[in-house]
Image (cartoon, helix red, strand yellow):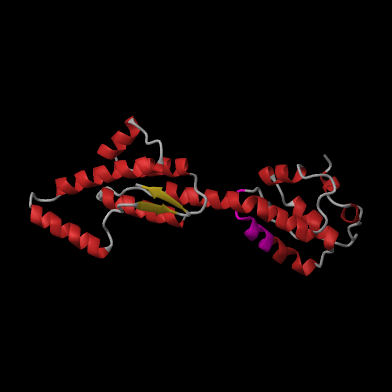
Amino acid sequence: MDDNALFTDDIRLAPIPEDFRPPRLEAYRGTTDPCEHVQGFEAAVRYCHPDEATKCHLLANTLKGEAFNWFIKLPRGHISSYEHLKWELIAHFIGQTRMIVSDMVLANIKQGERESLWDYTNRFFAAAAEAEDVDSAVAMHNFRRGLKVGDLSKSLQLAKPRSNPELVARASQFMLLEDAESSPPDVSGAKQERKKRKHRGDEPPTTKLHYGQKSWPR
């Protein structure tokens, strides 16, 4: 399809001024924040004073790759103004790019060589709680991948959890084992440590583990 046909006639048929010299514009491929692209685009064309139709064509010409494939699949005569095109672009790609960013953040969390399982799990789920629209299967994969080699990583490799609650329950079991192995056999001391953790708010959740807008029941 001719990408010009996606505009209404008043935009499609409007002539571009002969003396107009377009500025150098960054391409947009649909893998980064569309708001940033639009802001950069508007800053670049501001001093050229393009009319409505010219702005539409200029923005459309910056679309490459996945963004261009989305654009050419729009209905014929669909885009009626620059604002229309801008907000269609943002609405389509904003959720996808935020998910990519969130996934990348979780994928980069790794358990330190001397970091306890408790600290790693706490750090991972704290980041997960700040992430937006992360698929639970992706989160579980990133949690497993970030673990250093040990009993829990081997257990998750042999029998992958089928749900987030199952993952949390399994991790909790190994946290208790790790805590027991690293503590002296002093029952009263262990009780005191648990009381300290509870007082600090560090005690493992006994009901729910919140993940973004979702709750992972234990």
Q: Does 143 sit left or right of 89 as displayed?
A: left
| Residue 35: percent from left, percent from top | 64, 59
Majority secondary structure of the magenta segment? helix
Of the 4 image quadrants, the one containing the N terminus is top right
Q: In this view, does 137 lie to the left or right of 1?
A: left
Quarter assignment of residue 88: bottom right
Q: Is residue 59 magenta?
A: no
Q: Does the magenta stretch include residue 36?
A: yes
Query: 41 left or right of 191?
Result: right
Between residues 1 and 156, which one lies in front from this camera angle? 156
Q: What stretch is highlighted in magenta?
A: 31-40
Residue at point 85%, 58% (across, down):
53
Examine the rendered structure and indicate whether residue 24 appears above or below residue 138: below
60 or 137: nearer the viewer: 137
Name the residue at 37% across, 36% down: 161
Up/down of 100 relative to 19, above or below: above
Do we see residue 199 in this rendering? yes
Residue at the (41%, 55%) spot, across then down: 127
Q: Residue 159 at x, y = what percent?
A: 34, 31
Near-viewer residue (190 or 96): 190
* Residue 204 placement, left or right of 2: left
In the image, 190 versus 69, the foreground residue is: 190
Give me the residue at 20% from left, 44% from top: 177
Give residue 144's quadrant in the image: top left
User: How many numbered marks are there?
Assistant: 0
Q: Give the image location of residue 191, x and y in percent.
A: 14, 56
